[in-house]
Image (cartoon, rainbow, N blue to C red):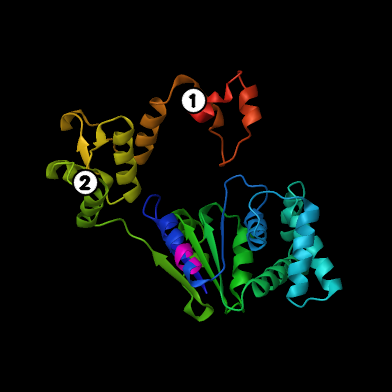
Amino acid sequence: TRWLIVAPPGVGKSRLLTEVADDCARAGVPVWRVDVRLGGASAFEPVAQLLLAALGRVGSAPESELAVALRDRLRAAGLSETRAEVLIEESLTLLRPAESAAAGNAARLPGADRDERFAAWLETLRALEASASAGPTVWLIEDLHWAEPDLLAFLDVAVTGAASRAILCTTRPALVERVPEWCAERLDQSIRRLDLEPLEPLDAGTLVQRLVGDALAPDLVERIVDRSDGNALFIEELLRSWISVGMLVPTDNDRWRLSGPPDELSLPSTVQAIYAAQLDDLPANARRLARRASVAGRRFFEPSLVAMDRVSSDGLEA
């Protein structure tokens, strides 16, 4: 089964996956969680992440170590030595940072070449699933709106004939606009879709009260609810920003209170405006470092930042 969870930023897609992962962990169901990154090494970087998650690896690992782990797991799943070596080489090609882009290019070829590559990856993943559990396995894939068409094609193949595998993907509505046919619900193929809606005003007000109790007057809570438009992330980040500047402070009895008049509180119009204000509040060196790190994608290398305009890495601690 494949579920596509569609919602704008801040509605709770990641939190939903976290709750699913926690429930699976309590039930002893293996969960492999990966994300699609803007500007990733290749279209199939999430597949490489799945392989690493299946092997219990986080981040990079020596190739020899990965080969040994793969060999042990594939043999435990009953594959012959010859077939295991073929799948290991396919997997290592996908996992090598320098060659993952080449793997992606090869997978773009039409016909048998791409089908064979997909089949090899899925055979490896099926074997890893079998060696991990006799029951179902859950894949959690975040931010599918960054996915390239080749990854979507792979996920189409992955859901076929995999009755013991559940794939939960999250995306912003942009993916629906870009490939509506791929995002459509197809019950006969075990493909389902869930659209998450923003919070209703009553629920948004309840969220504010659960986070800070009765620290805020009802009229201020109403203004927050109105400005948030039901976006839970907006509410959380707004309250966090007030705490960071000392406008909301904890009391001795584990409650919250305002430290100043309500009319001194800033009420930005968007989450982006909240983040911008938080950046403005950083010390000068940390703020300069954040500007240098503001590149497409989620990763950067500290030495490269230090080398740019002699920015000190001390800002990373701020």
Amino acid marked by disc 1: Ala
Work out whether residue 113 can be spotted. no
Q: Residue at x 59, y 73 (%)?
A: 159
Amino acid marked by disc 2: Asp
Image side of residue 285 versus residue 261, left or right: right
The region drawn magenta spans 21-25
Q: Residues within 10 Å of mark 2 (few under 14, many from 20)?
A: few
Determine the image quadrant of residue 224. Answer: top left
- Residue assigned mark 2: 226
Asked whether 146 or 298 is in front, the reply is 298
Work out whether residue 205 can be spotted. yes
Determine the image quadrant of residue 110. Answer: bottom right
Helix, strand or loop: magenta stretch = helix
Q: Residue at x 13, y 42 (%)?
A: 219
Look at the numbered disc 2 and give the secondary structure of its residue. helix
Image side of residue 304 versus residue 75, left or right: left
